[in-house]
Image: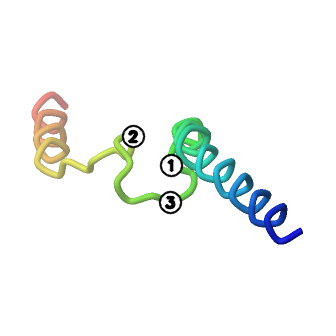
Amino acid sequence: MVQEVLVWLIFAAALAWLGYKFVWPKKKEEAGCAGGCSSCAVTPVLDVNRIEQELKQRKEFS
């Protein structure tokens, strides 16, 4: 009886590990950083220098 419970616990832990290892990363990519992760590669970087240059160019043309 105790052995059966231990086997089921190990089996459940193995399934959880496989899900965490293979399914969870794919779902995070599909979410598009909706989970709020700070190290996401999709997160746009605010480039202040580029924005200032574009504003200067727009002022020169107008």
Figure quadrant of residue 37: bottom left
Q: Tell me the residue at 66%/53% (across/down).
A: 16
**30 lies left or right of 47:** right
Image disc number at residue 36: 3
Q: Position of residue 59 (x, y in %)?
A: 15, 39
Instruction: Work out whether mark 2 precedes mark 3 in sequence or the reverse, and give the earlier one.
Output: 3
Q: Residues within 10 Å of mark 3 (few under 14, many from 20)?
A: few
Regarding mark 3 in the picture, which secondary structure is present there?
loop
Q: Amino acid at mark 2?
A: Val
The residues tagged by marks 3 and 1 sit, at their Cα atoms, a distance apart of 6 Å
Image disc number at residue 33: 1
| Residue that numbered label 2 is attached to | 42
Figure quadrant of residue 30: top right
Q: Tell me the residue at 52%/42% (across/down).
A: 25
> Where does the N terminus fall, quadrant-wise?
bottom right
**Nearer the observer, 55 or 7:** 7
Residues marked 3 and 1 touching at CB (< 8 Å):
yes
Regarding mark 1 in the picture, which secondary structure is present there?
loop
**Nearer the observer, 17 or 36:** 17
The residues tagged by marks 1 and 2 sit, at their Cα atoms, a distance apart of 7 Å
**45 lies left or right of 60:** right
Instruction: Work out whether mark 1 precedes mark 2 in sequence or the reverse, and give the earlier one.
Output: 1
Q: Tell me the residue at 14%/41% (across/down).
A: 50
The residues tagged by marks 2 and 3 sit, at their Cα atoms, a distance apart of 11 Å
Regarding mark 2 in the picture, which secondary structure is present there?
loop
**The residue positioned farthest toward the top in the image shown:** 61
> Where does the C terminus fall, quadrant-wise?
top left
**Nearer the observer, 60 or 29:** 29
Q: Position of residue 55 (x, y in %)?
A: 18, 42
**The residue positioned farthest toward the bottom in the image shown:** 2
**41 lies left or right of 59:** right
